[in-house]
Amino acid sequence: MTIQQFTFNFFAENTYVVSDDETKEALIFDSGMMNEKENRQLSDYLTQNGLKPVAAINTHLHVDHILGVPYVHETYGFAPRAHVADIPLYQRAAQQATMFGMEFKEELPALAAPLTDADVVTCGHLTFHIYHVPGHSPGSLCFHEKNEKVILVGDVLFNGSVGRSDLPGGDHDQLIRGIKEKLLILPDETLVYSGHGPATTIGNEKRSNPFLQ
């Protein structure tokens, strides 16, 4: 497995391309590109490495994580898969953008088949188990590849912090409870890839994250 991290838009959002090294199939997580330069960065990486996207996945549907959705849909034919609880956020993308002093006028495609924590997402030989961990957004999802000991968590958990819960639909107590019950039980060596900032491990966050003590 190869994970390529891109940091896009003025929210410094992390978009990930996760690929199976043998089959070259790839998943695009949280398309955050906001201009042509960032679009090219994503497409050039896929082309130069001979990767074949098989799905677009969203950990959640806050505006900074969906700015590149129209480009991915137009270029590769994939609308994002996400949790149904975040559909209202998706439908209010323009209003979300206004909250942060920006405009987002592009037309978003209809969401693809929804995801729940009863589902798995596959890519070549990779299998991602899904955990619904609301609190940052109602539909926040985490994607765990058990064999590779990797989890992509969106804005649920960060290196030394947790997702903000003061946005519409947020709930701090629910977020902390979900992190402790679903994420901190994973092996300490599990690599955590977040929606912003650097990677960390479950062990690091158990030991030193001030929000989880």
Image (spheres, grey):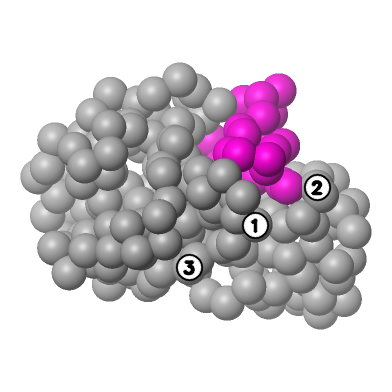
Q: Mark 2 or mark 3: name the one nearer the start of the chain.
A: 3
User: Residue under circle 2?
Assistant: 146
Q: Where residue 80 sits in the image (x, y, percent)?
A: 38, 35
Q: Spatial distance from mark 1 to mark 3, Cα to Cα?
A: 13 Å
Judge the density around disc 2: few (<14), some (14-19), many (≥20) Cα neighbours within 10 Å. Answer: some
For the magenta stretch, what is the residue range? 116-145
Q: Residue 143 falls in which quadrant of the image?
A: top right
The answer to whether 163 is drawn above or below residue 133 in the figure is below
Give the Cα separation between the discs numbered 2 and 3: 20 Å
Residue matched to label 3 = 5
Question: Residue 1, labelled with which disc?
Answer: 1
Dot 1 and dot 2 residues touching (CB under 8 Å)? no
- The tag on residue 136 is none
Calculate the distance from the C-alpha at mark 1 to the C-alpha at mark 2.
Answer: 12 Å
- SS at mark 1 in the image: loop
Q: In what element is the residue under mark 2? A: loop
On the rendered image, what quadrant is the C terminus found in?
A: bottom right
Q: Which residue is drawn at 62% across and 68% down?
A: 158
Disc 1 versus disc 3: nearer the observer: 1
* Front residue of this view, candidates 168 and 205: 205
Q: Name the amino acid type tagged 3.
A: Gln
Q: Can residue 136 be seen in this view?
A: no
Coordinates of residue 96 in the picture (x, y in percent): 27, 48
Number of numbered discs? 3
Mark 2: amino acid: Lys
The type of residue carrying mark 1 is: Met
**In terms of secondary structure, where does tag 3 sit?**
strand
Answer whether residue 198 is magenta in the image.
no
211 left or right of 21 in image: right
| x then y, percent, for residue 32 | 32, 57
